Every structure is written in C-alpha cells, then in structure tokens.
C-alpha cells in the first residue's frame, strides 16, 4: 500500500474505540471524500485487516508501520495460512477472556482471520436471476441465498435499488428460515433494528399476514422504513418498544422473534474491532437484557405460538445461559425441535449453534419455544 494511504489508515484506526466502531469511523471519514474509489476500497480493507491482526502488532511502533505490519500478516495468511500455528492464532486472534466464555477452537479463530464473505438474499424465487445479473455472484447454501465476491459497489446497482436483493449475512438468513413463518400469520420482530429479519420474514410470508417490527431505537426504525419501501414490503407495522413490560400491542402472535442486543462475538470475523472492545461485563449485562426481553415478549405469544430467541454471539452466559433461565421461569413454554439449516440432514435440536467456520458467515445461536396449548405449530417439519 502507498505510504500516503498507510497514513490515512493509521489516522482512521486511531479513531476506532468502543464508541466508534471501525465501520462507523470508515463511513464518516470516507464520506468526507478526497479518495478515489479504488483507494477508498483499499483503505477500508486495510482498516479491517489492522483490527483483525491487531493482536500481533507492536504497539510501540509508529502507527503507519503497525498498519503495514498488519497488512503483511493478512497477506501472508491468505497465501500460506499454515505458516501460522494454531497455538499462535488461539493466543493472539481473540482476547484471553473468551476462553472462559466461548467454546474456542483453532477452526473458529482461523475462520476469523479471513476476510468475511458477502452474502445476499435475493427476492423470493429470483436467486438465479440475481446471480446472472452480478459478476462474481454464485449460489449460496439454499434457494435465494447468494455469495458475492465481485468488485461492483452493490449499493449502486439497479438490482439493489429496485429491491431485488438485500445484503444479509447467511447466518441471519438461517434465523428467518428457523422462524419458518407462514403466509397469513401474525409475527412480532421485537428487536427489528434496521429490519434485516423483518424483510426476510415478510418474504417467507409472501408479503401476507402482518409483522409488528419494533425496536427501542427510533432511528433504526427509520432505516427499516426505507428498506421496506425499497423491497416492496407492506405487511408490517413499525413501533417503538423499549423492551419493558408495556408491550407495543395487545395482539397475540403466531410467532415472536427476539433477535436481541448481544455481545456480537459471532460477528468478530466481520467486525474485528469488537474483539478488543467487548468485555466480560458487557456479556453479563447483555445476557440480563436478553433474559428480560424474552420474559416480556413471551406474554405476546398465543397458545401454540412460538417464541424464537436469536443472538449473533457465542458466549455461554448469553445463548444457553439465557435459554436455561427462560425455561426455568416459564414452564408454560416447551422447547421446539429445530433443523439446523446448515446441516439439514441432522436430527432436530432444541438449540442451534451456528459457527462461522461452518456457516461461512457470522456465528449465531437460536433456541425456540412453543407456548403450550392448541395451535398449528404441532406438526411442523
Ligand atoms: C441484533 S440487533 C437486531 C438486528 C435486526 N433484527 C436485523 O436483523 O437487522 C438488536 C436490536 O435490539 C435493539 N435493542 C437494544 N436494547 C433493546 C431493548 N432494551 N429493547 C428493545 N430493543 C432493544 C437494538 O436497538 C438493536 O436494533
């Protein structure tokens, strides 16, 4: 990389901290302009490479030297991954505290050191069409999922503008599939954020039925509205919900998805800076928040309806810890068997762990329960 750009990258990584994640810093800095598109792209990759290889760099060196060192490591890893030992990767790629919280493996940390893959979800039934319209697109693991490794700026493509596809991580797509909503049902996406899963639920429901999409952050719901408009999704109702006991509606739902705020350990491949800012205290606090959200959202599940808990993290306190706490306090819910979309041949499990080294995307955990009572949930495949 040219020395001028090394300085640009060094200036950016100096601004990354807990409150300013790398993607936000990049967005703000690149928006200011001044870089050609190819340079902006190189800078963006270098910022993420730096965060990914930060466990190796010598912090006493000048920032541009550190960036150059990180880029050399990234290049070496792509060329000769076996030149890095498992022991070295386990010690440097993730912070030491993860060993007590996550089922850390060499396969997992190796997967985190690669540049993340970009996954798309095509409008229902149009996967082949999207693949043929984009250079560098190929089929993903199931219909409508697409792996993109092309160079084009997807946001500028006519297909994206027309809502023909969404950028959505493959593990997030798996969550929608695990929810398995049916056309005509009523769902609540309780932590809808910017609507990634709302859009998918709507697609699976063929735009029929109704989805309540709530979040505590109104600005995220504004983004959700833009995305639904682009995707031609109309069967939803946005609402602000702060996660408290007072629910946004008295409706009882066929399904409620709590895609809760979490420590994001499953996204450390895509968001490498988070490895160095998330703490065990965050994990404990977020587990408590998830437990509260589930307990409150559970009131809105109709008899025979299902409650789906999803998090893009892999710590035990969140995931199984939260699921166990919910089950202890809610005997009126029983676990639902789920078929891991990445291993459809395996028997149903009550908890699905999706690891990045298997998904080729984020890591996620999903558990689901059914409110005991009559309903059509019985008999689902
Ligand atoms: C993992 S993100 C959701 C991502 C979204 N479902 C998607 O697929 O694009 C978690 C969301 O929970 C929201 N959140 C955080 N704390 C909350 C709370 N106490 N009550 C409701 N929503 C909350 C955040 O604003 C964030 O949008």
Image (cartoon, rainbow, N blue to C red):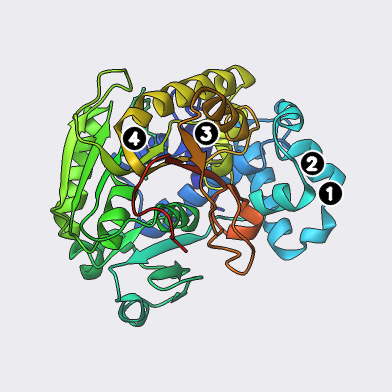
Secondary structure of the residue carrying numbered label 2: helix
Q: Residue at x 62, y 39 (%)?
A: 314
Which is more N-terminal, label 4 or label 2?
A: 2
Q: Which residue is mark 4?
A: 191
Label 2 neighbourhood size at 10 Å, few (<14), some (14-19), many (20+)? some
Q: CA distance from mark 1 to mark 4?
A: 37 Å
Say above or below: 366 vs 216: below
Q: Position of residue 105 (x, y in %)?
A: 77, 46
Q: Residue at x 47, y 27 (%)?
A: 15
Whether residue 159 sits left or right of residue 128 in the image: it is: left
Select label 2 or label 4 by which is in front. Answer: 4
Q: CA distance from mark 2 to mark 1?
A: 6 Å
Secondary structure of the residue carrying numbered label 4: loop
Q: Which residue is mark 1?
A: 86
Q: CA distance from mark 1 to mark 3?
A: 27 Å
Q: Is ligand 1 within 8 Å of the beta carbon of the residue shown at mark 4?
A: yes
Whether residue 358 sits left or right of residue 83 in the image: it is: left
Q: CA distance from mark 2 to mark 4?
A: 33 Å
Say above or below: 343 vs 333: below
Say which mark, if any, is on residue 13: 3
Q: Residue at x 35, y 75 (%)?
A: 127
Q: CA distance from mark 2 to mark 3?
A: 23 Å
Q: Residue at x 39, y 35 (%)?
A: 24
Q: Which residue is mark 2?
A: 90
Q: Is ligand 1 within 8 Å of the beta carbon of the residue shown at mark 3?
A: no
Q: CA distance from mark 4 to mark 3?
A: 30 Å
Say above or below: 31 vs 204: above
């Amino acid at each position: 990389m040219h020395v001028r750009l090394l300085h640009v990258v060094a200036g950016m990584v100096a601004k990354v901290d807990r409150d300013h994640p790398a993607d936000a810093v990049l967005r703000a800095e690149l928006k200011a302009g001044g870089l050609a598109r190819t340079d902006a792209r190189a800078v963006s990759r270098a910022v993420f490479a730096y965060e990914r290889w930060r466990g190796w760099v010598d912090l006493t060196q000048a920032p541009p030297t550190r960036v150059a060192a990180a880029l050399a490591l990234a290049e070496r890893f792509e060329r000769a991954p076996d030149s890095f030992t498992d022991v070295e990767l386990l010690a440097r790629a993730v912070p030491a505290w993860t060993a007590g919280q996550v089922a850390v493996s060499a396969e997992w940390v190796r997967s985190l050191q690669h540049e993340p893959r970009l996954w798309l979800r095509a409008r229902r039934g149009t996967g082949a069409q999207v693949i043929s319209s984009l250079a560098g697109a190929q089929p993903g693991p199931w219909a409508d999922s697409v792996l993109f490794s092309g160079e084009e700026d997807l946001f500028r493509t006519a297909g994206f503008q027309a809502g023909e596809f969404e950028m959505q991580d493959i593990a997030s797509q798996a969550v929608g599939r695990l929810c398995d909503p049916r056309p005509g049902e009523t769902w609540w996406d309780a932590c809808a954020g910017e609507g990634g899963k709302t859009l998918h639920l709507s697609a699976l429901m063929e735009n029929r039925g109704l989805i309540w999409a709530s979040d505590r952050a109104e600005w995220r719901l504004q983004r959700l509205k833009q995305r639904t408009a682009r995707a031609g999704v109309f069967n939803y109702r946005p609402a602000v919900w702060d996660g408290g006991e007072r629910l946004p509606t008295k409706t009882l739902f066929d399904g409620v998805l709590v895609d809760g705020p979490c420590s994001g350990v499953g996204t450390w491949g895509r968001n490498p800076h988070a490895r160095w800012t998330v703490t065990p205290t965050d994990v404990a606090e977020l587990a408590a928040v998830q437990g509260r959200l589930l307990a409150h959202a559970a009131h809105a599940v109709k008899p025979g309806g299902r409650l789906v808990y999803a998090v893009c993290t892999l710590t035990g306190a969140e995931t199984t810890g939260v699921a166990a706490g919910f089950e202890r306090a809610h005997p009126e819910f029983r676990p639902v068997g789920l078929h891991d979309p990445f291993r459809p041949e395996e028997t149903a499990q009550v908890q699905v762990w999706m690891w990045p080294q298997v998904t080729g995307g984020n890591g996620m955990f999903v558990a689901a329960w059914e409110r005991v009572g009559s309903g059509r949930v019985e008999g689902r495949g």
